[in-house]
Image: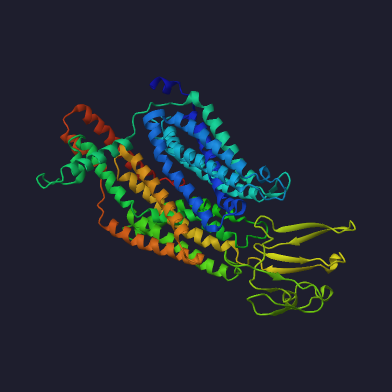
């Protein structure tokens, strides 16, 4: 290892190998967030699922992405090593992205060339296979890449290592921001062999291409990497220690065995006291993690419910049009702005005011801010619902009657009161007055939407029996629906456009309020939570807490899919209020838990065991762990870096 370190090429004081790692991370994050940005709209508009099922599958995928990192860490530390784990799982990841792009090509099964796939089962199965492979890939490499980058530095390069992590997390947010901006634009294009549809293949294909680039770039630098051999996974060791303590306690549950101060003390027969003390510290922090999934249940709905909400809003900003799935870009932009403001202005100001704004109190405030974001989303949804017509349910039928004659026509429908459809004279109307709309008499107001969120203009080329053609352009509004009447004279000057459903008049800019509140909550919750967790855990078990933190994200997404599938709330705004109330209740529970929490100094606790342990070898190990832990705490305190991010 030392020889390889000396031979490792450097540039500007940094190992050249880290540039391959940073480029790899940028491309991989672009691939993941780009695919994820358009995923829920792919489910709704291509596969044809409703909002609830689209939300359920979306959050199932996200949950799987945050469960697999534990598997990836175990494989890397106990079997393959970080480099091989990243390469092998990146190949799986790339295959998954390519399969997703193929699944979105409607022409594959569109045998009658009408623009609609004839075998939707094929597309659904392909997309599910692709998502499973992507979840295995992105989750598996998640805990490996950053740690592998840290391995490239020598012990005396602490400053360079710190700068690397800042650049590393900056590349994550750069990839997220650019992909969230670009892939919705690609989706909004029209593409196809036989018929033009929303270009989901391109929106998924570009992320797939970036993942291929990420894999090639990472492999290209393999001769420059420092590759450490697998040394065993500390997570497995902790789990074995906990399992032995539980079994031993159960086997000695009779009253004849004296009680011990802590249930983990029942592991003393097999494990040394230092490991047991470290596990106790970890468990103390993990106990505080129990209420945290509720925050992520709200936070990750930015990519599902909030994106679907944006589809019912007006995205016309004058100079440009924002696609619904592009609104997610507000979060990374605000993150970059808010983190420095909070660290350099808000927190110091609170400290000067004499308020003891501890990390756990910050996290509580973050949870409350997230609940306020959903209250804002609920209020906005109420305004949107006032402009959206009532569509028929699965048990209802709609019929629209058009009377193009000059005289009224009586209509009798079984089970309905008789009514008269007024006569209509095309030449007497210009197509915009309310009198035109009166000739529409519906049992239930409903019509197919012509205006898709991707196409603000509709262009028609119409040909009559005599071969005459005319090109007709209709400017559509977001969410609007029109009926175009063409008289038999084929005179388009007399054509009439009837607006069945008004365009969305609630502007998408109103969503910025809820995004702002959610981002503020993320900054004070997630960034603070990671710092707190690391400062309260032994230096050799920070990976255990990382696994626990990612697990809370997975559980949060599972909560969303349960509510989406099992919930019977008729209105979307009511679901937003439900989530907000649940998070407020959880925040109160967390505040009580935080009140009784006693902050620890892991270095001090380990130092006590160093005094009690006579073995010189173990003494040296303790000294190293204590030194590393103190160095980490001092580094966090002194730097308080502005580049802390939460997109992991």
Q: Which x, y percent locates residue 515?
A: 50, 58
Residue name at image x 31 percent, y 52 percent: 288
Q: Extreme front residue here?
A: 414
Tell me if 394 is positioned left or right of 298 in this view. Answer: right
Residue name at image x 69 percent, y 60 percent: 450
Q: If the image is split into quadrants, where does the N terminus sit?
A: top left
Q: Which x, y percent locates residue 132?
A: 50, 42
Image vertical order of residue 527 relative to residue 499, above or below: above
Tell me if 47 is positioned left or right of 532 in this view. Answer: right
Q: Which x, y percent locates residue 282?
A: 29, 44
Q: Is residue 154 visible?
A: no
Q: Extreme right residue here?
A: 466
Q: Is residue 252 visible?
A: yes
Instruction: Identify the colour scheme used.
Output: rainbow
Q: Tally the numbered discs.
A: 0
Tell me if 120 is positioned left or right of 374 in this view. Answer: right
Residue name at image x 24 percent, y 29 percent: 620
Image vertical order of residue 447 relative to residue 300, above or below: below
Front position in the image: 443 or 390: 443
Q: Quadrant of residue 155?
A: top left
Tell me if 230 is positioned left or right of 473 in this view. Answer: left
Q: Which x, y percent locates residue 294?
A: 39, 56
Q: If the image is split into quadrants, where does the C terminus sit?
A: top left
């Amino acid at each position: 290892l030392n020889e390889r370190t000396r031979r490792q090429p450097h540039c500007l004081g940094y190992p050249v190998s880290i540039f391959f790692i940073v480029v790899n991370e940028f491309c991989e994050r672009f691939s993941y967030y780009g695919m994820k940005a358009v995923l829920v709209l792919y489910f709704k508009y291509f596969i044809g699922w409703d909002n609830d099922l689209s939300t359920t599958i979306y959050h199932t995928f996200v949950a799987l992405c945050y469960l697999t990192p534990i598997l990836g860490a175990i494989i890397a530390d106990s079997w393959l090593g970080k480099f091989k784990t990243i390469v092998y799982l990146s190949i799986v990841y790339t295959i998954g992205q390519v399969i997703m792009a193929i699944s979105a090509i409607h022409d594959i099964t569109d045998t009658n060339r009408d623009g609609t796939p004839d075998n939707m089962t094929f597309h659904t199965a392909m997309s599910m296979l692709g998502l499973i492979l992507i979840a295995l890939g992105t989750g598996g490499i998640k805990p490996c890449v950053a740690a592998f980058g840290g391995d490239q530095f020598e012990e005396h390069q602490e400053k360079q290592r710190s700068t690397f992590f800042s650049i590393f997390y900056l590349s994550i947010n750069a990839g997220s921001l650019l992909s969230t901006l670009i892939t919705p634009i690609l989706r909004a294009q029209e593409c196809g062999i036989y018929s033009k549809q929303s270009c989901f293949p391109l929106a998924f294909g570009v992320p797939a291409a970036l993942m291929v680039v990420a894999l090639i770039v990472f492999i290209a630098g393999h001769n420059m990497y420092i590759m450490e051999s697998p040394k065993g996974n500390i997570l497995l060791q902790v789990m074995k220690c906990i399992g032995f303590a539980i079994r031993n306690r159960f086997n000695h549950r009779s009253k004849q065995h004296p009680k011990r101060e802590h249930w983990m003390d029942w592991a003393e027969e097999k494990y040394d006291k230092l490991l047991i003390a470290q596990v106790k510290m970890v468990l103390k922090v993990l106990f505080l993690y129990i209420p945290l999934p509720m925050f992520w249940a709200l936070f990750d709905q930015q990519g599902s419910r909030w994106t679907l909400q944006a589809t019912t809003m007006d995205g016309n900003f004058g100079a440009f049009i924002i696609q619904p799935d592009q609104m997610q870009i507000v979060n990374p932009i605000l993150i970059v702005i808010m983190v420095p403001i909070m660290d350099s202005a808000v927190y110091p100001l609170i400290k000067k005011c004499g308020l003891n704004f501890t990390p756990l109190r910050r996290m509580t405030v973050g949870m409350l801010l997230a609940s306020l974001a959903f209250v804002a989303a609920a209020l906005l949804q109420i305004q949107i619902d006032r402009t959206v017509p009532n569509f028929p349910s699965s048990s209802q039928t709609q019929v629209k009657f058009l009377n193009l004659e000059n005289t009224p026509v009586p209509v009798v429908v079984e089970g309905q009161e008789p009514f008269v459809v007024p006569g209509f004279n095309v030449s007497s109307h210009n197509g915009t007055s309310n009198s035109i709309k009166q000739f529409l008499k519906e049992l239930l107001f409903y019509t197919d939407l012509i205006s898709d969120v991707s196409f603000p203009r509709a262009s028609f080329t119409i040909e009559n029996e005599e071969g005459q053609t005319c090109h007709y352009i209709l400017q559509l509004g977001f969410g609007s629906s029109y009926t175009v009447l063409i008289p038999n004279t084929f005179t388009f000057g007399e054509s009439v456009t009837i607006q069945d459903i008004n365009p969305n008049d609630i502007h998408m800019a109103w969503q910025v309020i809820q995004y702002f509140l959610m981002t503020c909550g993320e900054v004070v919750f997630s960034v603070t939570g990671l710092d707190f967790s690391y400062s309260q855990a032994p230096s050799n078990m920070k990976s255990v807490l990382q696994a626990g933190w990612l697990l809370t994200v997975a559980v949060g997404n599972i909560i969303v899919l349960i509510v989406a599938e099992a919930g019977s709330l008729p209105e979307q705004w009511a679901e937003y209020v439900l989530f907000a109330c649940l998070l407020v209740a959880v925040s109160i529970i967390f505040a009580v838990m935080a009140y009784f929490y006693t902050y620890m100094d892991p270095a001090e606790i380990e130092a006590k065991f160093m005094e009690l342990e006579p073995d010189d070898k173990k003494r040296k190990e303790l000294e190293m762990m204590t030194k590393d832990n103190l160095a980490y705490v001092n580094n966090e305190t002194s730097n308080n870096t502005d580049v802390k991010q939460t997109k992991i």
